[in-house]
Amino acid sequence: MFTLSLDDETAARLQAIARQQNRSVNEVVRDLLEQLNDSQSTDNSNWALKMAQLAETDTTIEWNELATNLADNSRAILDNEFTDYLLKRTENKD
């Protein structure tokens, strides 16, 4: 157990955040500390995972169906369209 003294404004802000998220102040502080620790981490090996997690939780992102289709079908696109492109380019060199 650890006691932390906060000024009234900071304490009120923490309590308001906890109420908005329907969580305890302790949980909010713990998450804030984890976020701070993550942001200060020098290990960038999981940057793509972190970006994906942020994008997944961001409700303001509007996902483009075409982009999803392209990602899902990238192998077929490479096998078909890129092959056609290379063949045309080879034919034009003659």
Image (cartoon, helix red, strand yellow):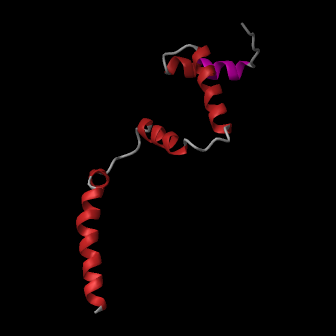
**Residue 87 picture quarter:** bottom left
* Residue 23 relative to residue 72: left or right: right
Front residue of 14/49: it is 49
Q: Quadrant of residue 12?
A: top right
| Residue situated furthest bottom in the rendering | 94
For the residue pair 42 and 14, the one nearer the viewer reads as 42
- Horizontally, is 47 left or right of 7 in the view? left
Vertical order, 55 against 88 (above or below): above
Q: Quadrant of residue 91?
A: bottom left
Q: Which residue corresponds to the image point at 56% horizontal and 13% vertical from the top-left?
A: 24
Q: Would you place residue 9 above or below residue 64 in this image?
A: above
Q: Is residue 80 above or below residue 29?
A: below
Query: At 48% across and 39% down in the image, what residue appears?
Result: 54
Q: Residue 14 magenta-drawn? A: yes
First to last magenta residue range: 8-15
Residue 1, position as x, y percentages in the image: 71, 6
Residue at image point 62% right, 34% down: 38
Does the magenta stretch mainly form a helix, a strand or a loop?
Answer: helix
Spot occupied by residue 42 in the image (x, y as percentages of width and height)? 68, 41
Against 70, is 4 above or below? above
Q: How far across and how far down the image is residue 40, in percent?
A: 68, 38
Residue 13 appears left or right of 78: right
Number of numbered markers: 0
The C terminus, quarter of image = bottom left
Q: Residue at x 44, y 39 (%)?
A: 58
Q: Position of residue 3 (x, y in %)?
A: 75, 10
